[in-house]
Amino acid sequence: MAAVETTYREALRQALIEAMTEDETVFVMGEEVGRYGGAYGVTKGLLEMFGENRVIDTPIAEAGIVGAAVGAAMTGSRPVVELMYIDFAGLTMDQVANQAAKSRYMFGGQIGVPMVLRMQGGTGRSAAAQHSQSLESWFTHVPGLRVVMPATVNDAYHLLRIALKCPDPVIFIEHKGLYVRKGTLDTERPDGAWGQSVIRREGADLTIVTYSRMVFEALAAAETLSAQGVSAEVIDIRCLNPLDDETLIRSVTKTGRAMVVTESVMTSGFAAELSARISERCFEHLEEPVLRVAGEDIPIPVSPALERGAVPSPQLIAETALWLVRRIAPSWAA
Amino acid sequence: MTAGGNKLLLEHYRTMRRIRSFEERVNELFVRGQSAGSMLHMSIGEESIAGVCRAMEPGDSFTTHHRGHGIFIARGADPKRMMSEIAGKSDGYCSGKGGSMHIADMTLGALGANAIVGGGIPHVVGAGLSYRNRRLPHVSVAFFGDGAAQQGILYEAMNMAALWKLPVVFCCINNQYGMGTRIDRAAANPNLHERAIACGLNGLTVDGSDVEEVHDAAERILGAARNGMPGFMVINCYRFYGHARLDKSPYREESEEVEGRKRDALANARKKLLARATADDAMLMQIDDDAEAEMNAAVDHAVAALSPPVDTMFRDVFAEGEPPPRPLRHHLSMILGEGR
């Protein structure tokens, strides 16, 4: 099939449909995934196509849903759970971190848990503090989980397709602000392999490392920077586990400057992990400290004006890059 | 009296005797300092779960809690491999990665023992979905204690099982104690099966000191579950000893323990067998001796077995062939090693 223009949501939906068609053990369960079609419409129409045994509307019982998926995965099924908001993960964490993640290990390799836990996070819809978080580092801190965060339409499709073949539990984190975003889907050409960081824009002066929606904010910043003569390389890591840090190391070895951009709050976030790896491995190539440009250490406020201010913008990324590369201090610099 | 009658009771006796011997030998392994750690929860006093295990069919699956040694024995697990696992040895069920609280044997449908109170309960709902969707005739049984009955996850799981009419059984082994807290200090209504009935399940409580009663009830509950009516059974029993190996139960009266230990399914089965003249003393002593010999051999096996090589710690975090975790020494070498 030739490349087509479609949305992130449609790409996800197509991946689910193809996987369910190919593999009878795949089923979808979650709150409102059936008749309602999913809170963000990703599972729309699946109930009619696959019936209620394979598209299961559940009670509002996040821990029970994920726990049931773990048991189904242990017994030959391949469940896809939709957790409506990543913010609800708190209710599920025992089943995710102690059950799904550790079963293979604790039981000496006897029991795999091939399940996909889809959820969405991030800001952009004025959904306030309990429906807007970026909690990926909750999951990357637990050995045994794969964590992927697609930014592009093509990755939404391909990473979900691979996740649905993965023998281990995959935390698949979508971004609520990307569902209607359009892009090119080429079902025959993935952006990169599973666990491979991808260079979205080449550059020579600094490396911007990011993932999920911030890829687009970083690309917009790179465009601005380019007009000012600064060449930024933008890397989308796509998979937080398995993580390809070699691509980052090569890039920063070349540029000598690195900035990690995340929507999640700075303290103890995944930006710290990426920053540490770059600092450790590129120490003698670095001309400046590795910077983190991350969300403010605050709950996400509801007012659109406040919400926008709580997470990095293209302007903030560009200003910080200029400061880093050209030592041009932004207006807000102390 | 149940179908199969006296012969079946003799079989129950043998199973329960093997469980008792196993637990006593586990205790000994600990005393000798040859177990891996101190997390040993003995199921002495709970042996009548043998009746539930006997009602299960090949292909049925189950999850257990941290006090599940007896359930594994009753479902046919190999005591040598169990003991090796408890000792953290390479040929243990989980290659020395799980220990006492995480024994599993997929060939027996054992989906793993869980050390999070209530953690394994919802897995049977998912197993039930697998069986329903693939039209398999199996039942999945969750074993847990009265402590787990106070966890919210049980109610989510029971509701889903009833809502979707899944082939699932919740088996609550009420040994009266969640660690040091007696049931009457943890549950306003200690008739736990009533909660299941409220959720739309078959629910009943049986006397755990009578293995025949347990078996009869389990046959009924599992039979109904196999036909889409999930169930919940409470086995009322008494935890003879402390919560874990180091616990001397200072929170309960000795007189209570003396009374509690009279609720002994093993002793009761013995009495019945003698009274019914199904077996004589010599025959029962032979069973006892065989069990002791078997479990002593399991201990000897575990003590002699090899510890796992240290680099096996990186195995099984992910499936074989998938990108493995990066060992610390490798990470450090990339920073400080040659080619820097």
Image (tube, rainbow, N blue to C red):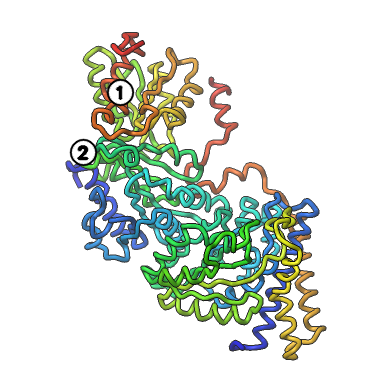
Residue A116 against residue B48 in the figure, above or below: above
Mark 2 — residue? A181
Q: Is residue B111 visible?
A: no
Chain designation of label 2:
A
Q: Is residue B278 visible?
A: yes
Q: Residues within 10 Å of mark 1 (few under 14, many from 20)?
A: some
Q: CA distance from mark 2 to mark 1?
A: 23 Å
Q: Secondary structure at mark 2?
A: loop
Residue A12, horizontal then vertical, whole percent: 27, 47
Q: Is residue A137 left or right of residue B337?
A: left
Near-viewer residue (A211 or B33) = B33
Q: Amino acid at mark 2?
A: Arg
Near-viewer residue (B76 or A251) = B76
- Give me the residue at 28% from left, 35% from top: A302
Q: Amino acid at mark 1?
A: Glu
Residue A291 against residue B265 in the figure, above or below: above
Residue B28, horizontal then vertical, whole percent: 78, 59
Residue B183, horizontal then vertical, whole percent: 59, 63
Q: Residue furthest toward the bottom?
A: B277
- Give me the residue at 42% from left, 57% from top: A64
Near-viewer residue (B54 or A283) = B54
Q: Secondary structure at mark 1?
A: loop
The disc at residue A202 is: 1
> In this rendering, which labeled residue sits more in front, label 2 or label 1?
2
Residue B303 against residue A233 in the figure, above or below: below
Chain designation of label 1:
A
Residue A296, horizontal then vertical, whole percent: 37, 27
Tags 2 and 1 both on a single chain: yes
Q: Which quadrant does the C terminus of chain A fall into?
A: top left
Q: Are marks 2 and 1 in contact (CB under 8 Å)?
A: no
Question: Mark 2 vs mark 1: which is more N-terminal?
Answer: 2
